[in-house]
Image (tube, rainbow, N blue to C red):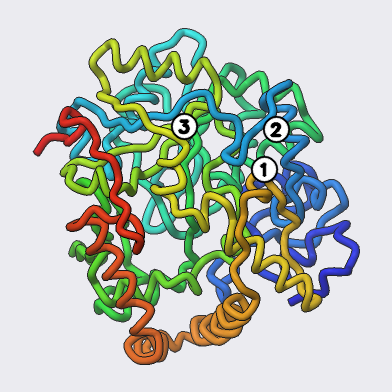
Amino acid sequence: MTDQNINNNNLQPVIDNNMCIACGACIMADQSLSIQFNSKTMMYEPSGSGNEMAAKVCPSIKVDYDFLHQKRFPNITPNEHGVVDSIWLAQSTNITQNRNASSGGVIKELLLNYLSLDEVDGVIAINHKKGLEFEPDIIRNADEVQKLPGSIYHALSSEKVLKLLKENDGRYVIIAIPCQLEGIYSYIYNNEPDLVERIHTVIGLSCGWYYNHHALKAICEYKNIDYEKISDISYRGGGPIGKLKITSNGKETAISRRIDFDYQVAFDRSFNIPRCHFCINHVNYFADIVVADAWLPCTVGTKTGTSLVICRKSSTTETMKKLVDSGKIRVADATVDDIVDSQMRRNAFGDFAYAYAKYVKDNGGFCPDLKGPNFKEAYLISQKMVKSFHSSLILKRQLQQTGKYKKLWWRKATIELPKLSWRYIRWFLVKFLKIKALSGRKHKEIPRKLNGFL
């Protein structure tokens, strides 16, 4: 890794350490730059080191959480989960839309509601172009909403979000993951504050991490799929968890995301974008409303999925109430405890990420400067565990970049098998025993009306 002590006045450390998340903030700040795909790392990166302004807005160098919170939510002090107005468990009452979704179809109900408003001119969301190419697009009607793809887990470029916002008059709803939104708002508030008026509402996705394209090449090798001829891909849908579906040469292959061993190898955390390992903002602090999977013992029995919804503004709380009153969604009350339980505390509070950043900095490496409102609640994991993770990560990334996916498979089947087995045990405890911790503490039951279309 590049020395942490270098002067971060350009993007070179981001390039050297593969930290780019392709939000597009840098290319707006420095017009000489573009976003390009690196065929070795199988990730996106800026075309050059750029200038100081590009570095200033890059969320892979630093995110000023205090500054952005003050801008987004003036005169409101965030708690460890950010600014919270209300929390819900929710799902769409449209059975078709609900079953086609992964978490209950709530996002599409929100989009349809916003597009019905005179003050909203469109939605900026990721749309499918061809093959593995997905990019931001303006969606203007209900038919286009229904055709939107579900969550995309592989690396893509979101550079067009800011361009679309700048080039089109009107007001827009934006769907964004946390790091992307950090870049968008860092650019806007530092360079073009008037652009914020073109954002009507931000629907934030909760995000654990996403993957370089080596993950796709690996799963294609394991399943005998032609990677070069992939015409479509879907990571979720069809209810909770869902299946990874890859279409290549006219044939669709469906892969279980829960129990398939090949999937567990190909979507191991070593395939994550490196910046994901340092992320402390999984619950999307700067969105107006956040939609997450409700991975709770009390929701595992639902057939159609359930969303955990965090409203950060009173206006989005009112929107949720409007959808309930109109019969579009069904809801149950939730609490901040549900945020931690559904997203795991290591994500909610950055237990791993803060510890990993400390390890990297202490050893002279480079990592993003990230310190959010959850820092005071973080229980940093041991440096011994972090060191073990880091050593393993370096080895596995070398195997990825030399195309030795079979060696990764055998590694998971041998020395890493005990750790993987524990994941299946945890899943069994939650799904069948409804136990959320080894202490045996059980989770509250959700109301019968939220059990979905059984």
**Above or below: residue 98 compared with residue 281:** above
Q: Nearer the viewer, residue 292 or 331?
A: 331
How far, Cα to Cα, is label 3 from label 2?
16 Å
Using a 10 Å C-alpha cutoff, classify the residue at mark 3 as few (fewer than 14 neighbours), some (14 to 19) or many (20 or more). Answer: many
Are dots 1 and 2 in contact, CB under 8 Å? yes
Residue drawn at x 72%, y 50% as measured from the top left? 371
Which amino acid type corresponds to the residue marked 1 in the rendered image? Answer: Pro
Quadrant in which the N terminus is drawn: bottom right
Quadrant of the image occupied by residue 70: top right
- The numbered disc on residue 267 is none
Q: For residue 373, which numbered disc appears in the image?
A: 1
Residue hosting label 2: 69
Measured Cα–Cα span from mark 1 to mark 3: 16 Å
Q: Position of residue 441 (x, y in %)?
A: 32, 53
Q: Which residue is mark 3?
A: 310
The answer to whether one can see residue 36 in this image is no
Quadrant housing residue 71: top right
Q: Residue at x 72, y 59 (%)?
A: 368
In front here: 122 or 187?
187
Relative height, residue 120 to residue 359 (above, below):
above
Residue at the limit of the structure toward the right, as seen here: 7
State which tag comes first along the sequence, 1 or 2.
Answer: 2
Mark 1 and mark 3 lie on one chain; the one further toward the N terminus is 3
